[in-house]
Image: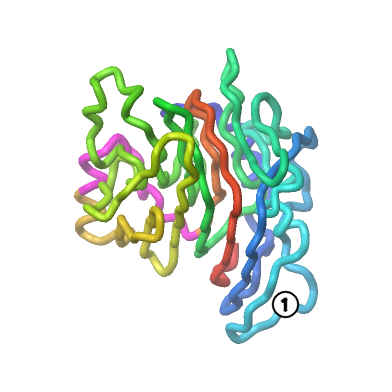
Amino acid sequence: MSLNSKGLSKCMSNHLSRRNFVAAGTLAVCSLRSGFSAETSQCQDNLVGETSNGSKQGGQAKDQRGQNADVWRGMSLDGWMGLDGQGVSGGWQAKDGVISLRKTLLRSGHIVTRQEFGDFELGFEWRLAKGGNSGIKYRVRTYGDRTLGCEYQIYDPSGDPNGGAVERKNSTASIYDLYEPNDQVHVRAIGEWNTAKIVVRAGRIEHWLNESKVVEATVGDQEWERRVAGSKFNDVKDFSKNPCGRIMLTDHGSDVAYRNFQFSSFGTEC
């Protein structure tokens, strides 16, 4: 995928030296309800989710009730932006605690958090339209003119032109094009909500689906390097080895909805 990432690159560079996350050793926890409304502000100097005064040290939990919490509560899209660094527009919307994308004639585009995150755990529920394709990306950064990251794939093969014969490493709950889910994977019927979780901590990645852990990977180990070499990311130097990055909700031309985000950060300073 090749994307215009000038706006995102500018926003990232403006804040490269900012310390806008919880201090090392802190466990920040949000258990929130999601939904969003559009906002048109440009990439601002004050990123959403900066550490407030009085952050606890030494591994104590900190409930992020400030602007960062609002990103996951879903009362607005203030904490999100397009890849050009501008506010969110198009088919993205928030209503009754649900963040959703409605398919439009022209794609609305991917959206990313204004905040960068280090190690984290993100739980959520998702629902996809029949034949749809979507996903949540993390450790998102720019690589030249491309904006990439690992992806929790969300996909309904009934819309596949090859009759659903999609590679397992591109199926729901996979680390897209890298790691296929195990035999514990179970996707609920179209129209039903699925529960999911992404865990990224100390170089380890886990994908969960409907209460089962279905993918495990270690970034940078021999198996990781082998799989990256056999993927569409084989020309990307140090793919997803960055310790911090944004979280992306993708627009692949399908209706998709998310709710009940639960976000915990593990104190990596970004």
Residue bearing mark 1: 55
Name which residue lies at 39% across and 38% down: 189
Percent coordinates x, y for residue 221 in the rendering? 25, 61
Percent coordinates x, y for residue 112 in the rendering? 60, 42
SS of the residue at dot 1? loop
Placement of 269 over or under 137, stated as above or below: below
Percent coordinates x, y for residue 164 in the rendering? 26, 27
Q: Is residue 160 in sight in this rendering?
A: yes
Compare residues 225 and 104 and report the one nearer the observer: 104
In which quadrant is the N terminus drawn?
top left
- Does the magenta stretch mainly form a helix, a strand or a loop? loop
Name which residue lies at 66% across and 49% down: 34
Compare residues 182 and 60 and report the one nearer the observer: 182
Q: Is residue 230 magenta?
A: yes
Give the left or right position of residue 149, taking residue 61 as reference.
Answer: left
**From this viewpoint, which residue is outermost toward the top?**
105
Magenta segment: 227-243
Q: Is residue 173 magenta?
A: no
- The residue type indicated by label 1 comes to Ser
Compare residues 212 and 57 and report the one nearer the observer: 212
In which quadrant is the C terminus drawn?
bottom right
Estimate how packed mark 1 is, as few (under 14), some (14 to 19) or many (20 or more) residues with alpha carbons within 10 Å. Answer: some
Percent coordinates x, y for residue 199 in the rendering? 44, 61
Color encoding of the figure: rainbow
Name which residue lies at 65% across and 52% down: 115
Q: Is residue 237 in sight in this rendering?
A: no
Compare residues 146 and 113 and report the one nearer the observer: 113
Give the left or right position of residue 112, taking residue 209 as reference.
Answer: right
